[in-house]
Amino acid sequence: MVARAEAVSVILPVLNERDNLEPLHARLTAALKPLGRDYEIVFVDDGSTDGSWDVMKRLVASDRAVRLVRLRRNFGQTAALAAGLAHSRHPVIVTLDADLQNDPADIPRLLAVLDAGDDVVCGWRRARHDPWLTRRLPSALANRLIRWLTGVRMHDMGCTLRAYRRDILADVHLYGDMHRYLPVLVGWVGGRIGEIEVSHHPRAAGASKYGLLRIFRVAVDLLSIKFLGDYATRPNAIFGGFGLASLGLGALAFLVVAYRVLVLRRLEPTPMVFLMILFVLTGVLSLFIGFLADIVIRGFYETQRKPAFYVRETDGMQGVE
């Protein structure tokens, strides 16, 4: 007897995509129904103000597979995805944007690769239909930097179209703007990562939510990811190293001052005295910060996980455990 394919939860963060939702739902249904899998489509309204919620209410009334989550305000894409995960129920998770630039027709190919043994399969928008200066160039630079710092060899870290196994996501905590780094986080907990080329379409309606300012947020998040990945459980490795280096520079400055006074007999003021004091104080403080961080990490590591979102209401959730 052939085992039934695993059921799928499709999660879509929505922010002011009123004109895209009905055609998106039609394309999702056309892609998912022929698969012979149980599925649900979870729309997460991340504080829309253009009437998107009214459109979603019509969809949930006409399709039993649709489920809705409405957040109290705009918390961001990461929080919206976390809310969708918390309110979905199936063992396979598919995420994509609600702007119709991701193509639901690619979902069956993602699932086929996932079924072959990977824990996450990511889309690669090789032929992107976005502005070069504000979207494609920053994305190319960011992807190159991410590959270099994290060691995860992916071409397109910014593509939301991905398929995951729920059990691997149970070991990953979503917060801040970390959704784009989910493959990195999955890789760090031992997950197997796949990547396939997917279609990408020009935006037909609505406005892009991204701009050049996102570059700075991506850079800060990348530094956080690097720190969490390498030093989250041993923060003194970085604070202690910096502290010892500062103490070493302080000792060097002390030797220079001692040489001037004891050998050269020069007693006039020198900047080396100031540098000596600065390096010694910085080194001592860094070591103490590292020790305190180690104590905090060992005592409270991952014991409190506050949600990154707050739900106003849900719909279509009957039967969800």
Image: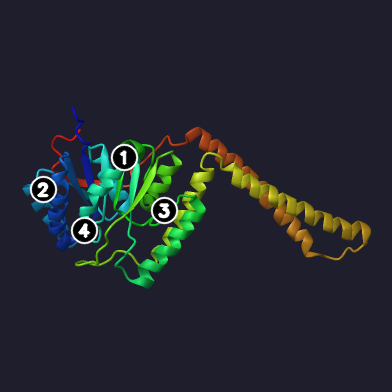
Residue 200 at x, y = what percent? Answer: 27, 62
**Looking at the image, do the residues carrying marks 2 and 4 touch, with CB atoms under 8 Å apart?**
no
Circle 4 residue? 48
* Rendering quarter of residue 134: bottom left
**Looking at the image, do the residues carrying marks 1 and 4 touch, with CB atoms under 8 Å apart?**
no
Measure how far apart labels 1 and 3 are at the Cα level.
19 Å
Q: Nearer the viewer, residue 161 or 178?
A: 161
Q: Residues within 10 Å of mark 1 (few under 14, many from 20)?
A: few
Measure how far apart labels 3 and 4 are at the Cα level.
32 Å
Q: Earlier in the sequence, mark 1 or mark 4?
A: 4
Mark 4 secondary-structure assignment: loop
Residue 169 at x, y = what percent? Answer: 35, 40
Residue found at x 26% / y 44%: 111
Measure how far apart labels 1 and 4 are at the Cα level.
37 Å
The circle drawn on residue 60 is 2
The mark lying in front, picked from 1 and 4, is 1
Q: Earlier in the sequence, mark 2 or mark 1?
A: 2
The mark lying in front, picked from 3 and 4, is 3
Q: Earlier in the sequence, mark 3 or mark 4?
A: 4
The circle drawn on residue 154 is 3
Q: Residues within 10 Å of mark 4 (few under 14, many from 20)?
A: some
Residue type (three-letter) at the residue carrying disc 1:
Ala
Measure how far apart labels 2 and 1 are at the Cα level.
32 Å
Circle 1 residue? 116
